[in-house]
Image: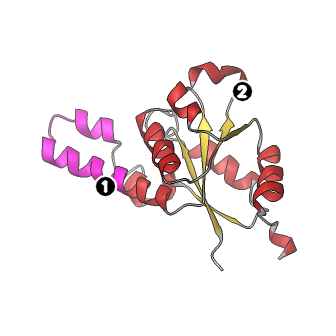
């Protein structure tokens, strides 16, 4: 049986650390669940040695076709992972942009549940309404999220298997 897959959507491009820190924190806090957390920051096309889409596009030495090829690799890779996931967990903060909006919209259109977790619940107004409207349920911490996944979707704890 395949493990449940949850894609960790959220800001990368506009996030000060490229979205790495919050995803690592969530991975650590959810490590006791029998669930595969899919972190787009872990994929080669999103690593530091590969420039971000915006910085690559703004580099005057790169031509249009090279920039579009680079961007397409990122978009296609991330959206493939979204489509292969059982759930999406969108990390909700003021840095969410068009990539996050695209991921949650694709998930919603594919009937993949989109769950959200706020980095700072008091700043919910800084998250674009398009993104929020795609979210089925929002959590303010990983403990509440884990309880929900266990009780509503039957996700198991690792030590119970």
- Nearer-N-terminus badge (2/1): 1
Which stretch appears magenta?
53-76
Task: Give me the residue at 72% from left, 54% from top.
Answer: 28
Task: Give me the residue at 47% from left, 45% from top.
Answer: 103
Label 1: how many residues lie within 10 Å, few (<14), some (14-19) or many (20+)? few
Residue 73 is inside the magenta segment: yes
Q: Nearer the viewer, residue 33 or 131?
A: 131
| Residue 82 drawn above or below residue 158 | above
Residue 111 position, x and y percent, is 55, 53
Task: Give me the residue at 84% from left, 56% from top.
Answer: 151
Disc tally is 2
Residue 131 position, x and y percent, is 53, 33
- Rendering colour mode: secondary structure
Considering every residue shown, the one lying at the far bottom of the view is: 1
Q: Nearer the viewer, residue 54 or 76?
A: 76
Residue 57 is inside the magenta segment: yes
Task: Give me the residue at 69% from left, 49% from top.
Answer: 26
Q: Nearer the viewer, residue 59 or 86?
A: 86
Q: Quadrant of the C terminus?
A: bottom right
User: 69 left or right of 113?
Assistant: left
Q: Quadrant of the N terminus?
A: bottom right
Pointer 1 residue: 73
Label the magenta part by its dominant secondary structure.
Answer: helix
User: 31 left or right of 115?
Assistant: right
* Label disc, if present, on residue 133 of the rendered structure: none
Secondary structure of the residue carrying tag 2 is helix
User: 69 left or right of 5?
Assistant: left
User: 82 left or right of 51?
Assistant: right
* Label disc, if present, on residue 121 of the rendered structure: 2
Label 2: how many residues lie within 10 Å, few (<14), some (14-19) or many (20+)? some
């Amino acid at each position: 049986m395949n493990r449940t897959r949850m894609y960790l959507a959220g800001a990368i491009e506009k996030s000060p650390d490229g979205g790495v820190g919050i995803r690592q924190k969530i991975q650590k806090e959810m490590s006791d669940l029998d669930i595969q957390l899919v972190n787009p920051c872990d994929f080669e096309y999103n690593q530091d040695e590969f420039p971000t889409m915006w910085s690559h596009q703004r580099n005057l030495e790169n031509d249009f076709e090279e920039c579009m090829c680079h961007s397409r690799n990122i978009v296609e890779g991330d959206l493939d992972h979204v489509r292969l996931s059982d759930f999406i967990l969108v990390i909700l903060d003021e840095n969410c942009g068009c990539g996050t909006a695209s991921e949650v919209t694709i998930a919603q259109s594919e009937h993949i549940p989109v769950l959200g977790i706020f980095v700072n619940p008091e700043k919910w107004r800084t998250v674009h309404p398009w993104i929020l409207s795609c979210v089925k349920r929002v959590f303010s911490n990983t403990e509440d999220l884990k309880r929900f996944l266990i009780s509503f979707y039957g996700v198991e704890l690792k030590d119970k298997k």
